[in-house]
Amino acid sequence: AAPAVSSQASPGGESFARNQKELQELCKRRFFYRPAFDIYGGVAGFFTYGPPGCAVKNNLIRQWRQHFVVEESLLEVEDTCIMQHAVLKASGHVDRFNDFMVKDVVDESKFYRADKLLEEVMDEKLKAADITDAQRQEYTVVRNQADAYSREEIGAIFKKYGIKSPETGNDLSDPYEFNLMFPTPIGPGGYLQGYLRPETAQGIFLNYKFCLEQNLNRLPFGVAQVGKSFRNEIAPRAGLTRQREFTQAEIEFFVNPKNSDHPKFKSVEDVVVTFFHSNEQLAGKDPVTFSMGEAYSRGIIKSQILGYFIVRTYLFLVSAGVKKEFIRFRQHLPTEMAHYAADCWDAEVFCSLGWLECVGIADRSAFDLTCHAQATKVDLQYKEVLDKPIEQEVLQLQKKSGITVMKAFKKDGKMVKEWIEALPQEQLAELEALKGPKKVDINGQSFELTPDLLQFERKKEKISVNSLTPGVIEPSFGIDRIFTVIMEHVYYARPAEEAGDDKQKRGVLALNANMAPYKCCMLPLDQRIARHEKYISLASAFRSELSALGLSSTSDEGGATIGRKYARNDELGIPFAITFDFTTLEDETVTMRERDCMQQIRLPLREAAELIRDLCAGEAQWEGAFKRFNLCLAQ
């Protein structure tokens, strides 16, 4: 995984850190989310979403499905959260899904993720008032590479800067690997090893063959999955941004590896995006801004498909409420790339924590399908029927060489021979060019192949079907992180002069209507209205009308003043408030208040539900409604 957080400042983003404490208090008090098992003291890395938070999160996922699954005609699957050992062994997670950890040599209960601790140390050094330009560049480069160092390199960096335990000042151990997966036995005997899945992606790869059939054997196509993933984080903190149980929304877009064009690329090539290329990071330079078309022509983005999904991701984040000036796409460094990735760009969003990775868009090449095909001996290649048969030269293992391989590896000989014969042409060519021994992993066992064992021949074959293993472009969305940055980007407090005599700061969540937990709140002016039979009847009918239109609503029938009720619902991000007063009892008209401008209009109750529906859908604008209905004084 790429560095999740970078604290390099973004102009205009100072308010996120300034408002962080207020927002956290609001989220806990209004139960958007809070620590799980809170009455037992809680456990780091686990959180519970309350009613408004759950509603916002569900709206975010609904928007994601509309933006990607519906608009891109993706298939969707739902796979299991528990995966057997063989699956994750083949995918590389058992052996390589690790982070480097260090621990306090005196107090061994204190553990730290090495790359994150290094980032924090560099952040502090970058804040020093007397820092030189050379030091700034040095610390920036080290910080940018924190997740890219080998165990030996990061150990040497820790020694160079004399990094100690941040809580005690004690020495730290040398870095060592820690696997992030949660193991779990399967079945009453516990003999079958399983794991809680570390990502939703593997469930898509396992079912690629069946989804291809559902798609009538057409390429390219995409498969999506939304669900929980689990990682035993070394040092979970920073709220929802580093949890041990979290929600992912992932897409695996299967493509012909020899064709990186996208039919809809022209529709996004004029969209301007900020890129942080690996060259700029290694040189300690700033990101650059280009249109996607220019980035592609300059070679910054090498695949139209990758570029298309970068722009679609950018547009999704903006539609959900992320401020576009605080979005950038950072390329992984060559040494930082995940074991499966050929290229990867992270959508990073600036927030109170700095630059936070919220989406990873990776070119996974054919890694996963190749691994699962080899492990299961199931053909996962795409069969392209050619219009006219073609004659093609193919490389294959000589018959006598196959016998030699079987003799050399004895009881495993047949398995090794079949593995070699099933390799794609490119990998057979690599084996033919061997100059020395090469270790290969087959079904979890290690074997050494030498040039004297491998003799190949070329033959002409007429083929009418072209077989290939699809490449994969994977946009992977961290829903909880996106939720976090949206909340920070939409939060503000009313200026003091607007707050009146109310001593409590009036926080507002200016959520887009499509993200708001409720679209409307119903407010009786006071208790006399709340107890009146006609109000009860009108409110019940109005609530039913809203529900029939698919609009969620709530009501506040407490004894607080109407101003305080408005403030309470502004905290929840509810865009519209309907107030029932004494005039309502006479002519069935109500006032409607808009959350952000606080303007009010008076209209017949029978028209309110459809107006709210149109405003939430973007089919009507508040300015138009304000002109249409009687003008009331702003709050």
Image: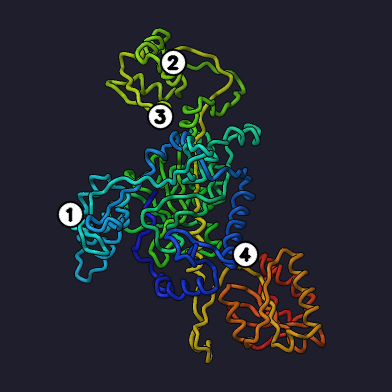
Specify whether residue 432 is in view. Answer: yes
Q: Amino acid at mark 3?
A: Gly
Nearest to the eye among marks 2 and 4: give it.
2
Nearer-the-camera pick, 221 or 452:
452
- Residue at image coords 58%, 35%: 219
Residue extending farthest to the bottom is 501
The residue identified by callout 1 is 160
Compared across the picture, whether 456 is left or right of 26 comes to left
Assess disc 1: are there few (<14), some (14-19) or many (≥20) residues with their C-alpha within 10 Å of its C-alpha: few
The residue identified by callout 4 is 514
Rounded to the nearest angstrom, the CA distance separating label 1 from label 3 is 38 Å
Q: Amino acid at mark 4?
A: Asn
Compared across the picture, whether 462 is left or right of 610 comes to left
Nearest to the eye among marks 1 and 3: give it.
3
The residue identified by callout 2 is 414
- Residue at image coords 54%, 57%: 315
What SS does tag 3 mark? loop
Nearest to the eye among marks 3 and 4: give it.
3
Nearer-the-camera pick, 378 or 108:
108
Instruction: Choose the circle earlier in sequence order: 3 or 4.
Output: 3
Contact (Cβ within 8 Å) of mark 1 with mark 2: no
Nearer-the-camera pick, 300 or 161:
161
Assess disc 4: are there few (<14), some (14-19) or many (≥20) residues with their C-alpha within 10 Å of its C-alpha: many
Position of the C terminus, as image quadrant, is bottom right
Instruction: Choose the circle earlier in sequence order: 3 or 2.
Output: 2
The residue identified by callout 3 is 444
Instruction: Choose the circle earlier in sequence order: 1 or 4.
Output: 1
Instruction: Choose the circle earlier in sequence order: 2 or 4.
Output: 2
Q: Amino acid at mark 2?
A: Lys
Assess disc 3: are there few (<14), some (14-19) or many (≥20) residues with their C-alpha within 10 Å of its C-alpha: few
Contact (Cβ within 8 Å) of mark 1 with mark 3: no
Instruction: Choose the circle earlier in sequence order: 1 or 2.
Output: 1
